[in-house]
C-alpha cells in the first residue's frame, strides 16, 4: 500500500521528573475518541526518533495517535556537548520513557496506551513506574546487549566493537562520538557503560545496580516480541532474556526469517523502513489493534522451550490465530 500524503505532526518538549526537557513529536487526530489508542515509540540506543516517522505515519493512517521522542542526549533531546553529560540506559527508561507515559495520560486522557520498542526501546518499556497503564507492547529485536547472546559467527567481532573499542573511545572523548565514526548518534558515556558491561542481568549493569527495584513486573500487557533470524543482536537467547523480565505480561515471541517475506536479509534496523510496510508492519498493526497474530503472519512462534538459567519462566506464552483478519 502507499501511505497518504504525510500527516502533520507537532513538535513538543516534555520535562522529565528531574526537569530535563525531552523533545519529540505527536501525531494527533483532530477529533477525540476515547477508544483510539495512543502509541509511544521507543527508539533503539542512539537512534533518532525521526527514523520511526514513516512507521508513525502508518499507525496514524490506521487510526492511532502516536508519540515519538528522543532519549536525553540524542536528537531532539540533545542540549550541547555530551562530554561529561550524565545519562544512562536506566535514565532513558525510568525518567524519559516515564515522562512519555505521563504525557500520554495527560494529553490523551482515557485513551488506551500502547508501546512499540525497538532494540533497547523494548527494555525501556519495562522501566517506567507507570508501566501498568500499557495495554499492548510490540518489541522488535529487543534486548540489552549481553555479549554471549550475540549471533555466534560474529560474536567476537561484535564484542571487540561494542565492548572494547566503544568504551575505550568513550574513555578518551568523554562520550562516544558515534556520528563521526558512522556507527550511531553520539552517545553519553553512562549509556556506553551500561551497554559494554559484560553481565547477563540488567540489574547488574551499572545503572541497573542503582535502581532500588526493577519495575518490569508492573507491566501487565499483551507483549509481542518480534525477532529476525539474521539480526545478530536479536538472537533467541537475547530476546527471551529480556522477555523473562516481563513476568506480569502475556508474552508471545514471533521469529521471522528474511525468506519468509521474500528477502535475503533484514537485520537489526530495517523493520521500520517503509519498504516493509506491506510485509512486516501489518504484524505490529494487528497486535496493536487486537492483540492477535493473523493466519497470514509470517514466521513461527517460539514455544515450549527453556529460556535461560536466570530463573525465567520455562515457556513463552502463545496466542492463537483468530479467524478474522484485523489488518483491514
Image: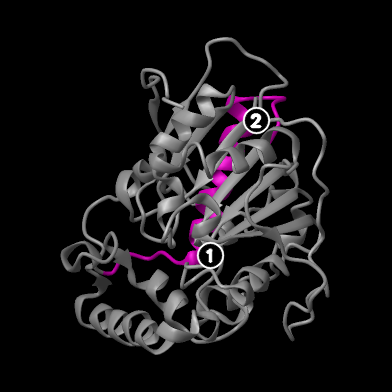
Residue 68 seen in the current view: yes
Compared with 39, 149 (above or below) is below
Residue that mark 1 sits on = 90
Drawn side of residue 263 relative to residue 157, left or right = right
Q: Position of residue 37 (x, y in %)?
A: 66, 29
Q: CB atoms at circles 2 and 1 under 8 Å apart?
A: no
User: SS for tag 1?
Assistant: helix
Q: Position of residue 183 (x, y in %)?
A: 26, 66
Q: Which mark is residue 18?
A: none
User: SS for tag 2?
Assistant: loop
Drawn side of residue 162 relative to residue 235, left or right = left
Q: Position of residue 72 (x, y in %)?
A: 39, 53
- Please give the name of the residue rendered at 65% of the width and 30% of the height, measured from the top-left corner: 327
Query: On the rendered image, what quadrant is the C terminus found in?
Result: top right
Q: Position of residue 224 (x, y in %)?
A: 68, 52
Please identify the residue farthest to the left as the structure is shown.
180
Q: Which range of residues does the magenta coloring cover?
A: 84-113
**Front one among 266 and 176:** 266
- Please give the name of the residue rendered at 39% of the width and 41% of the height, measured from the top-left corner: 275
Magenta stretch: residue 129 in it?
no
Q: CA distance from mark 2 to mark 1?
A: 35 Å
Magenta stretch: residue 94 in it?
yes
Query: Circle 1: is it few (<14), some (14-19), or many (20+) Cα within 10 Å?
Result: many
Q: Quadrant of residue 216?
A: bottom right
Query: Circle 2: is it few (<14), some (14-19), or many (20+) Cα within 10 Å?
Result: some
Drawn side of residue 177 relative to residue 235, left or right = left
Of badges 2 and 1, nearer the viewer stands 2
Q: Earlier in the sequence, mark 2 or mark 1?
A: 1
- Please give the name of the residue rendered at 69% of the width and 41% of the height, measured from the top-left corner: 287
Q: Which mark is residue 327?
A: 2
Q: How many marks?
A: 2
**Front one among 22 and 257:** 257
Amino acid at each position: 500500500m502507499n501511505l497518504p500524503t504525510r500527516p502533520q505532526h507537532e513538535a513538543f518538549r516534555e520535562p522529565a521528573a528531574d526537569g530535563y526537557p525531552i523533545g519529540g513529536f505527536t501525531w494527533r487526530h483532530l477529533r477525540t475518541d476515547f477508544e483510539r489508542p495512543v502509541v509511544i515509540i521507543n527508539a533503539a540506543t542512539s537512534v533518532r526518533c525521526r527514523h520511526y516517522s514513516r512507521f508513525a505515519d502508518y499507525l496514524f493512517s490506521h487510526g492511532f495517535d502516536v508519540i515519538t521522542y528522543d532519549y536525553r542526549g540524542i536528537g531532539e533531546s540533545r542540549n550541547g556537548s555530551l562530554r561529561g553529560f550524565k545519562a544512562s540506559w536506566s535514565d532513558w527508561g525510568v525518567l524519559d520513557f516515564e515522562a512519555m507515559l505521563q504525557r500520554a495520560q495527560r494529553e490523551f486522557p482515557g485513551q488506551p496506551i500502547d508501546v512499540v520498542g525497538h532494540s533497547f526501546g523494548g527494555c525501556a518499556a519495562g522501566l517506567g513506574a507507570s508501566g501498568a497503564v500499557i495495554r499492548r507492547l510490540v518489541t522488535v529485536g529487543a534486548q540489552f546487549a549481553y555479549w554471549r547472546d550475540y549471533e555466534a559467527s560474529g560474536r567476537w567481532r561484535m564484542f571487540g566493537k561494542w565492548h572494547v573499542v566503544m568504551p575505550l573511545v568513550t574513555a578518551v572523548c568523554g562520550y562516544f562520538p558515534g556520528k563521526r565514526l558512522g556507527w550511531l548518534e553520539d552517545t553519553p558515556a553512562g549509556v556506553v557503560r551500561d551497554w559494554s558491561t559484560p553481565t547477563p542481568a540488567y540489574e547488574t549493569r551499572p545503572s541497573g545496580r542503582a535502581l532500588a527495584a526493577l519495575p518490569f513486573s508492573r507491566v501487565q500487557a499483551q507483549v509481542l516480541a518480534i525477532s529476525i533470524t539474521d539480526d545478530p543482536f536479536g538472537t533467541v537467547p537475547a530476546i527471551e532474556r529480556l522477555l523473562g523480565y516481563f513476568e506480569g505480561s502475556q508474552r508471545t515471541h514471533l521469529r521471522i526469517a528474511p525468506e519468509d517475506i521474500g528477502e535475503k536479509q533484514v537485520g537489526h534496523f530495517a523493520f521500520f523502513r517503509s519498504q516493509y510496510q506491506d510485509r512486516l508492519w501489518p504484524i505490529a498493526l494487528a497486535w496493536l489493534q487486537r492483540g492477535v497474530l493473523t493466519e497470514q503472519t509470517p514466521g513461527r512462534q517460539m514455544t515450549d522451550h527453556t529460556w535461560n538459567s536466570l530463573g525465567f519462566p520455562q515457556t513463552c506464552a502463545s496466542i492463537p490465530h483468530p479467524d478474522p483478519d484485523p489488518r483491514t
